[in-house]
Amino acid sequence: MQLTLEFGGGLELLCESVKVHNVNVDLPKGADKLTMRYLLSWVRTDLIKERPEMFMKGESVRPGVLVLVNDCDWELTGQLDTTLEEKDVVVFISTLHGG
Amino acid sequence: MEADAKPKKSGPRLCCICTKRRAVLKRPKTLEQICRECFYEVFEEEIHQVIVENQLFKPGERIAIGASGGKDSTVLAYVLSELNRRHNYGLDLFLLSVDEGITGYRDDSLETVKRNELQYGLPLKIVSYKDLYGWTMDEIVKMIGLKNNCTFCGVFRRQALDRGAALLKVDKVATGHNADDIAETVLLNILRGDIARLGRCTSITTGEDGPIPRCKPFKYTYEKEIVMYAYFKKLDYFSTECIYSPNAYRGFAREFIKDLERIRPRAILDIITSGENFRISTSTKMPEQGTCERCGYISSQKWCKACVLLEGLNRGLPKLGIGRSRGLNNDIKKDTKQAGGTKSIESKQCGSLDF
Amino acid sequence: MACNSATCNSSGCYKEYEVEEEQRQPTTRGGINGSATTHQILCVKCKSNEFVCCGIGGDDARFCKDCFKTNLYGKFKQAVSYNAMITPSDKVLVAFSGGPSSRVVLQFVHEMQCRAQKNFDASKDRSLPVFGVGVAFIDESSIHSFASQGAEKAIEDIRSIVSKLAPPEKELYVVPIENIFSSDNIDGKERLKKLLDAVSDVTGKEDLLIHLRMLSLQKVASENRYTRVVLGSCTSRIACHVISATVKGQGYSLSADIQYVDSRWEIPVVLPLRDCPAQELNTLCSLDGLKIVELLNGPWSSINGLVSSFVKVLQEENPSRECTIVRTAGKLTPFHFNRIPDIHDSSVPSATRRRQKRHSIKPNGSLSSESFCPICNSPLNRSNFSSSLRSLESNKNSDIFAAAACSSCRFQIIPKEPSLTEQFVSLLPQPLITRAKHGDRGDFSLREQIQEFLLSDGEDEI
């Protein structure tokens, strides 16, 4: 599945300072849809190069990291249970640094 | 990407204010689901209300916005210039930045501020540690190492901002401290046992008895909304942590606040309410305000903290400034008597400024 | 405690009774300096026995077993006598949960009673009576899901612990928490369950239970003519309360909850272990083989749980952090009820009375007729309180109740839906309803009590 992932607010530093990543994520075996829960674990293993604890805490993002799916706050779409579709844009922004 | 390009299959949730457009944000303060346009409106309107209710500004005042290039000050500069126009505040706004002299961090963020100067049409003034104190943070860190460098930076920045504000001849400095920052400060002051600061830290305006008061128009504004606002408005801000400040202790408190916000978003405002309502006896002795004998800056001691730290740096005894200040000033009194020769050299740094 | 944080203001440290612990520089925790390792490490106090345990002061607080215990008991004794917590004519009820803190407080109260008994037996005129001690265990097994067998075993253990703390004999009250409804003559268990189910917020539910527990203790104490309720709240517990009250927006009332004495209740509540960190109490339990019954407190969740893990992390980073937190909150201005009402009983030694006058907190300025939240009994911030009542339009009991509550209880405990509010209020135990009725219209049940304070304070001034 083609997805665009964007990292901002300093999170880009965790993936070699590249802000926008066009990626192809395969559905997990036996699943018929791709959830944010799966995408996060995929990002953690396949995209993040350093300090994953700045991005994740438990199975979700670290508190203080905002997530938008197609420019919509993921708190409105079901957070970890949000289902992703082809060509979706997922944005991660850290609020944790810089005043 | 376009916001309205792809609503989810489950059907778009509608904004609970206009009930027309698709909701894009859940407000931490009210848990309302609102659309982008309504978000802009309530966000700006709330800040306007805070400014009006607390009489932060008077018509005709010159106001410096403490600008670091980060999200908070960038959004503050944008919103203040917007509100100033819309509601005819009649303010002269300026951007005021401090250049600590940190390569790879402040030089980059200052570029952002310089762009903001053009984008928002606000005159920019930069004051640098090098000019004010003769030391950049890079040089200070080279000398003292990574421990305690934030003490230096904090003390120097506070004074630098005041000196910059005086150069701009402004009436007040507005800073971008948001609700999360203030809640964090309340907690830190409890953890440190600093009752005097605990009493002061939730005031929306501080330093009214000093040379230049400061105010925090974002006192009740959630960090989440500031970042969302900057993102939706595509505001140009710089977001990298200071390379010298992996401050674990402050980090604990910040992480705690974020964990809290996740369980109960209202907790951030509740902490501020607590801070405002603490029963702190006003009869508690406050240190008497005087002026620094060396540079003339406000100080409750013989020398202001910056001069004490600077003295240490210049004499190659950086430890001099760390710890409790009462002892330090005594030390210095003794030291300066003994080493009269150094005094004239030291006083140059601060003395060259007209304060 | 010896404070090793750079920002600590040494004047606030508990110097008075810990002269042996001087202000120390930050050192690596638990590390023993090279110079020390070559010698036998001696107790810092008696300098003769080998040390076996550390107070939370770290290296500078290495004590032998006896000195450690004496030091801890000293803090307890100091709190008791400086605040006139227990006088010879008192009958004190110790709240015992089975945990280490309340186990230690029970032990200390017992030891104090033994000494008083010894003095009584030795004295000729026997003029000073020995204070009485009772123990209350609030049985919450009806609302926790674990097996009732476990609860039975726990109660058996508690009985055996208390029976061994004799002489003097101590009455033990094992009280099911649902007994707060007993006067209403209905099925308490069912009602309690319904009441807690009506609270949707997890933290609110936990907090309501804490309030109900206090209500139970007050009921037992009052019915059996006790004059004090003794809690085992230790420094660590109080530190957590400071942070969680702050987080819940209870900054105004916070200072009421963390003093040595709290006499806003019918029976005054005292906290003699306020200066003892949990770590030291745990150490004492294991050193002295004090049996602990840990079962009936499930793990905290939600805000309270988050706060206690936060405080734990801070404590690990700096062992005196909890003390600093409590000390900060201790600088907030207490309320007029944070002292034992003046003693006029002639059987009380005049030294105690004098001491009380010297050390007890003077109410500050205007002694206002404080209003209290009907649920948590917190004093209400006047400005917030009157505005919520002014905006009140309805005359319905439940609405008045909600408006009379503090903003924290309104948010996390009282249901928002009007019909649910009504149901919730109807389920509350009678004392809370009474509290609301007397509190919200300026007609205080507390007025008489307050009047007393007014008079006695006036006398003090003359």
Image: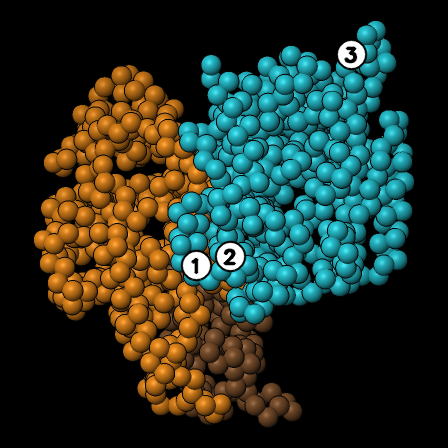
Chain colours: A brown, B orange, C cyan
Secondary structure type for disc 2 = helix
| Discs 2 and 3 carry the same chain letter | yes
Q: Are marks 1 and 3 in contact (CB under 8 Å)?
A: no
**Is residue C64 among what the camera can see?**
no
Q: Amino acid at mark 2?
A: Ile
Above or below: residue B47 compared with residue B170: below
Q: Are marks 2 and 1 in contact (CB under 8 Å)?
A: yes
Q: Which numbered disc, 2 or 3, marks the residue closer to the eye?
A: 2
Report the quarter where the C terminus of chain B lies: top left
Label for residue C127? Answer: 3
Q: CA distance from mark 2 to mark 3?
A: 51 Å
**Which residue is rendered at x = 52% and y = 86% of the image?**
A83
Q: Nearer the viewer, residue A50 or C161?
A: C161
- The amino acid at mark 1 is Leu
Chain of the residue under the numbered disc 2 shown in the image: C
Residue tagged 2: C400
Q: Which residue carries the number 1 mark?
A: C392
**Of C404 and C153, the residue lying toward us:** C404
Label 2 environment density (alpha carbons within 10 Å; few <14, some 14–19, many ≥20)? some
* Amino acid type shown at disc 3: Ser
| Residue C209 versus residue C232 in the image, above or below | below
Say which label, 1 or 3, has the lower sequence index.
3
Chain letter for mark 1, please. C
Local SS, label 1 = loop
Q: Is residue B16 visible?
A: yes
Which label was assigned to residue B63?
none
C181 relative position to C198: left or right: right
Residue B300 sits above or below residue B66 on the image: above
